[in-house]
Structures are given as C-alpha cells and as structure tokens.
C-alpha cells in the first residue's frame, strides 16, 4: 500500500504533464512551424548588394492579400526559377541562392509568404498555397513565361509549398532541397511518444505531392542535415516519378548548398539543362 500511495501521485503528475504538453503542441503548432520574425521581418538587403538588377514585385493573391517579392532577370535567360524559401527569415536572407541561379543563366522570382517580410496578412498552410498560386500566375500571365520554362524551387518548408504547386500545374521541373516528407512525419520523429499524427493541424505533405506530380524532379539533401533527417530526402526520391535525380550534398541544413560548392552547382546545372532542354 505504501508503494501504491507513492506511485499514484507520481502517475497523476506525469499524466498531467503529458496531457499539458500534448495540448501545448496542439495549440502552438503555428508558432512551432513559422518563424517570420527570426531574425526579423526587416528587409536587410536586396539583390543590388551583390550586383544584380531586380524588379520589386507586389502580387495580389486570390483572397486579396498583397505579397512582396523580387524578380531578378538574367540576360538571355534559359528559364525562370520560382523560389519558395524556408520557414524563417525573408527574401533578403536568400541573396546567395539568387546569385547561384543568376550564374546558371536563370531569372528568379522569389516571394515572401503572407506574414513574412513586407507581405501582408497572417501566415497559414492554405495561405502559403494561395501565395504560391499568385506567384505562378504572375509569371505565366504578367510575365508571359511558358510553364515549361519555369522550374519550381523549394527549400525546407518551401519545398512542400512548391511540390503542392507542381501538382496543380505543369512546370519544367521541381527542385526540392532539404525538404521533409510531411509535417506529421517530422513531428513523429521529434516527439515519438506523442500522438502527433492525431494532433497535427498542418499537413504540408511533400511526399504525397511528389507522388502526384508528373514533372522532372531533383531531390537535394545532405546526410549532415541536423534539422531534417537525410531519410526524408530518400523517401521523397523514392516517391517521385521518372524522370528524377538525387543530389547528395554535404553540410548542414542552412549552409549545405554553400558548403557543397561545385557539387551543388554542377548538380543544378545538369538537372536544369535536361529539364529545360538547353545546351549544357
């Protein structure tokens, strides 16, 4: 009896803590997924800092939210990259990638999701999909760019957004860099003893989208990724239809594309050349 008297309060306390943590995860999911204020929403630089001409772009979504971005043209562009960034920061933190795409002879449209940077609104999963659709319409309707000349590029969270867009349209290709299979999958890896699949209010199912898309796909991932396990990239590649490529890089989640240098650049060049059918 003495042992039972001791254990019962302990079990109750552990149970209350467990339920409280589950409730915290359920209520705070948006704050655990989106980081528009990390490091801040301030636009700290623009492409002119690295010597690139650009056009500031304001796009109105179908639900009347104004999102901001940049169109960075390349001379005699082979095609256009539609760039969806990760869950933290804003477009001003992606200048290195803009430089890489420009070096490859590609124009780039990069946007900030609603609630990020100078874009209006409050971020949500449905909202990010609407933002992506608006960016696609801007390229195909305003810029008159043929869908086959557009390559959708998504890094981390942006990969799930880009993959969702690729299912609805016919881009020249889809590049997913350091992308998870889905939010519930990632949550299950982080919290294996919590019923996160039941608690999750967000999907961002990149694996399902990749399986449903029919355009060429390039999956880029590093075994050293400390945030999204390498196995996610392998699963995405296995789900993708042909034609598809896998580019293994090195380095962490946020710097792999820089650390990998020539390996990264050559992998992009090969995929883009084959997808857009331009001379390598």
Image: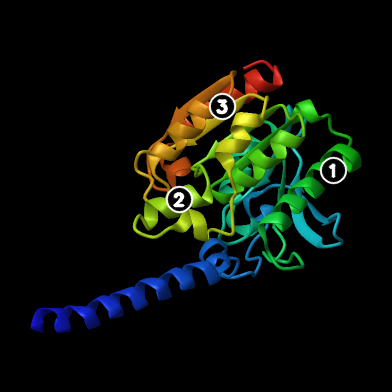
In the picture, residue 102 is in which quadrant? top right
Colour scheme in the image?
A: rainbow
Query: Residue 170 location in percent, x, y?
Result: 76, 29
Is 132 left, or right, of 240 in this rendering? Answer: right
Is 255 left, or right, of 68 in this rendering? Answer: left
Residue 86, above or below 258 = below
- Residue bearing the label numbered 3: 240
Query: Residue 132 location in percent, x, y?
Result: 74, 48
- Residue bearing the label numbered 2: 186
Please report whichever mark, 1 or 3, sits nearer to the chain's N-terminal start: 1
The disc label shown at residue 137, or none: 1
Task: Out of 268 and 156, give the one closest to the viewer.
Answer: 156
Please report whichever mark, 1 or 2, sits nearer to the chain's N-terminal start: 1
Mark 3 Cα-neighbour bin, 10 Å: few <14, some 14–19, many ≥20? many
Is 275 left, or right, of 8 in this rendering? Answer: right
- For the question of whether residue 31 can be seen, the reply is yes
Residue 33, above or below 229 = below
Is 236 left, or right, of 172 in this rendering? Answer: left
Q: Residue at x 49, y 53 (%)?
A: 197
């Amino acid at each position: 009896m003495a042992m039972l008297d001791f254990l019962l309060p302990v079990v109750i306390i552990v149970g209350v803590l467990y339920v409280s943590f589950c409730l915290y995860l359920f209520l705070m999911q948006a704050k655990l997924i989106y980081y528009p204020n990390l490091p801040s929403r301030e636009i700290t630089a623009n492409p002119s800092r690295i010597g690139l001409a650009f056009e500031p772009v304001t796009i109105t979504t179908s639900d009347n939210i104004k999102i901001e971005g940049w169109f960075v043209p390349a001379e005699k562009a082979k095609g256009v990259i539609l760039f969806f960034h990760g869950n933290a920061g804003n477009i001003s933190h992606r200048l290195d990638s803009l430089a890489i795409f420009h070096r490859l002879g590609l124009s780039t449209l990069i946007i900030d999701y609603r609630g990020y940077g100078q874009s209006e609104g409050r971020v949500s999963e449905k909202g990010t999909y609407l933002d992506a659709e608006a960016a696609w319409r801007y390229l195909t309707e305003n810029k008159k760019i043929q869908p086959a000349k557009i390559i959708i590029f998504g890094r981390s969270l942006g990969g799930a957004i880009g993959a969702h867009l690729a299912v609805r349209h016919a881009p020249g290709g889809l590049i997913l860099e350091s992308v998870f299979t889905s939010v519930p999958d990632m949550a299950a890896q982080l919290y294996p003893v919590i019923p996160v699949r039941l608690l999750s209010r967000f999907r961002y199912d990149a694996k399902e989208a990749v399986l449903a898309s029919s355009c060429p796909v390039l999956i880029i991932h590093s075994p050293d990724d400390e945030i999204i396990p390498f196995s996610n990239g392998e699963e995405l590649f296995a789900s993708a239809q042909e034609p598809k490529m896998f580019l293994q890089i090195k380095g962490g989640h946020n710097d792999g594309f820089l650390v990998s240098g020539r390996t990264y650049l050559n992998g992009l060049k090969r995929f883009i050349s084959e997808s857009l059918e331009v001379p390598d």
